[in-house]
Amino acid sequence: MNPNSSYMFYNFDGLTSVDLSTWNASEVTSMAYMFYDDTNLKKVNLTNTDVANLVTTDHMFQYCSSLT
């Protein structure tokens, strides 16, 4: 993953689930606005995702009204 993964899935209306459990996120420092306004997003799997260097998650899930 790119160290700046901000806006990666921003406003993806068709996105309903994302599995990041196998992604190498060890160098990611920003996930700000990553899922912003993904109103149909219901599930995000971050199990075992290494976020040791993550600095900001500002508004990461803002307006994700379908998340459970």
Image: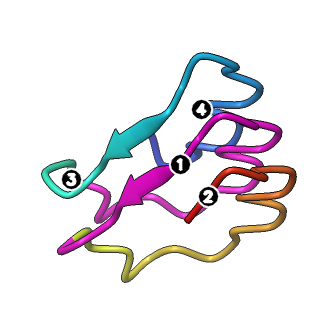
Sequence-first tag of 4 and 1: 4
- Contact between marks 4 and 3 (CB within 8 A): the answer is no
Image quadrant in which the N terminus is located = top left
CA–CA distance between discs 1 and 2?
A: 4 Å
Q: Amino acid under label 1?
A: Lys
Rendered image: mark on residue 4: none
Q: Which residue is mark 1?
A: 42
- Separation of marks 3 and 1 at Cα, in angstroms: 22 Å
> Looking at the image, do the residues carrying marks 4 and 1 touch, with CB atoms under 8 Å apart?
no
Asked if residue 26 lies in the magenta stretch, the reply is: yes
Q: Out of 68 and 23, give the one closest to the viewer.
A: 68
Query: Per the image, is 23 magenta?
Result: no
Going by the numbered disc 2, the residue's amino acid type is: Leu
- Where does the magenta region start and end? 24-48
- Between circles 2 and 3, the one closer to the viewer is 2
4 horizontally vs 66: left or right: left
